[in-house]
Amino acid sequence: MTNPWLESFLFPEKQAIEKGYFPVDWEKVHKELQKKNVTLTLLHYECATEAREGGKIPYAYRTFTENYGEYAKKYKLTMPILRKPGESMEVDWAGSTLEIIDRSTGEAIPAYIFIATLPYSQFSYVEAFMDMKSANWLIAHIHALEYFGGVPETLVPDNLKTGVIKALRSEPILNEAYRELADYYRTVIVPSRVRKPKDKASVEGTVGYLSRQIIATLRNYHCFHIEDLNQRIFEKLEEINTIDFQKRPDSRKKVFEEEEKSYLQQLPQTRYKLTEWKSAKVQLNYHIQVERMYYSVPYNYVRE
């Protein structure tokens, strides 16, 4: 081995620069690739244009992709799915619950925790509810979208009955009220595939993290109203969203405000009004009953 050979082996990028090739900032390429509608083909074109303008030799596309692939290897352990800003909002109920004390009986009533996460920034929203029925599921989505100040392209729920009636591989059957909410906010519901945890990895990871940081912290806190409990949850949530990441720069809130918020669609001027869908059988008097009120329908639908 000679010194020139050793240098070319240890520092191939230096050799390329000395031969007149344009030096590429691979960290910048990696960050740009995470943005919406940005591809390696586009980034290679931009680098090649900049190289020619500066009198340098641009990398061929194949060499460009190979070099980026080598650089990106270090991210593969922590980035199994590449997320784009404003692309999706992952939602779920936490497995753990908190408690509210009934003043009259002293009974501990469970409070169920809703969690919504934007995968790109990990910016999250958390709220407690007295049950996990469809109305609260929809209200939780409305509050989360208003907290984020915008609407993502897709909503990614688990295949729970309040959101998905039947989880089919081709096209899941959605709860009608949930579908109406998505239409109103101009977004699309894409349920995670059954037994595919990586489809919803961000919220699954956030559920575990928030269970430790919020639910475990408040496990011994005694409150008598859901509003009081949510006030404490919001205080802890604000603390979590503003604290710096351990393995990357900045906080969830800062990354959201600087890199993701501008990609969200605008909220409608008025809040969505909840609807409730029910099935009713037409009686012999060709009427259906909804909440003790009778409504007539064509007689040929009797017993339907």
Image: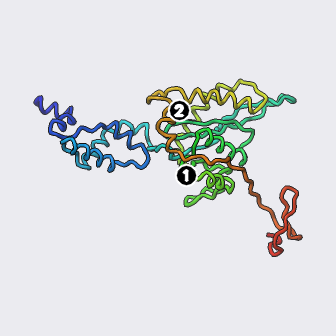
Residue that appears at 36% across and 40% down: 30
Q: Is residue 127 left or right of residue 78?
A: right
Q: Which mark is residue 80?
A: none
Image spot of residue 220 (x, y percent)? 71, 24
Q: Residue at x 76, y 27 (%)?
A: 223
Distance, label 2 to label 1, CA atoms, is 29 Å
User: Which residue type does callout 2 highlight?
Assistant: Lys
Residue ID for mark 2: 253
Farthest residue to the front: give it.
Answer: 269
Above or below, comparing residue 40 to residue 17 in the picture = below
**In-front residue for pair 123/282:** 123
Which residue shows up at 57% across the image and 43% down it? 150
Which of the two discs, 2 and 1, sits closer to the camera?
A: 2
**Residue 53 placement, left or right of 135:** left
Quadrant containing the C terminus is bottom right
Identify the residue at the far left of this view: 2
Between residue 49 and residue 9, name the one nearer to us.
Answer: 49
Q: Secondary structure at mark 2?
A: helix
Residue in front for this viewpoint, 58 or 166: 58
> Is 126 left, or right, of 55 in this rendering?
right
Label 1 sits on residue = 193
Where disc 1 sits, the SS reads loop
Crowding at mark 1 (Cα within 10 Å: few <14, some 14-19, many 20+): some
| Type of amino acid under label 1 | Arg
Front-most of residues 73 and 256: 256
